[in-house]
Amino acid sequence: MGTIHEALKQLYYSLGGNADNVRNADDPVAIILKMAALAIGESIAAASVKELPTLPTDDGTYQLQVVIADGEDPVYSWEAVE
């Protein structure tokens, strides 16, 4: 059975961390600090994530539609389902 240390190391690796940085680490806090040093929050914040359109206010059933045309950015809209 794995330990919290091994689980944290696996998480660190999956976030793009270099295995050499935590290979001999046996302190969970040290591993977590290495994860924080990856600064993945900055990468996520810089990603071009689109917000969903405002939710419909009328009663009904809706589906989120995404239209991509001519290589342009996607256009998101709520479409009523009849």
Image (cartoon, grey):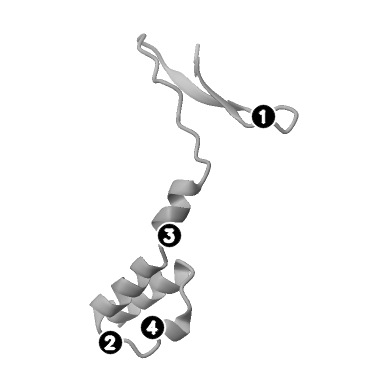
Q: Which residue is drawn at 28% across and 79% down?
A: 30
Task: Report the front residue among 47 and 23.
Answer: 47
Tell me the distance, in whole angstroms, between the alpha carbons under discs 4 and 1.
Answer: 43 Å
Residue tagged by mark 1? 68
Sequence order check, earlier mark of 4 and 1:
4
Tell me the distance, in whole angstroms, between the alpha carbons under discs 2 and 1.
Answer: 48 Å
In the image, residue 6 lies at what x, y percent?
34, 80
Within 10 Å of disc 4 (Cα), the crowding (few <14, some 14-19, many 20+) is many
Q: Is residue 20 found left or right of 26 in the rendered image?
A: right
Residue tagged by mark 3? 40
Query: Image quarter for residue 54?
Result: top left
Amino acid at pointer 4: Val
Tell me the distance, in whole angstroms, between the alpha carbons under discs 1 and 3.
Answer: 28 Å
In the image, residue 49 lies at what x, y percent?
50, 40
Q: Residue at x 68, y 30 (%)?
A: 72
Q: Is residue 22 found left or right of 71 in the rendered image?
A: left
Q: Are marks 2 and 1 in contact (CB under 8 Å)?
A: no
Residue tagged by mark 2? 26
Residue tagged by mark 4? 22
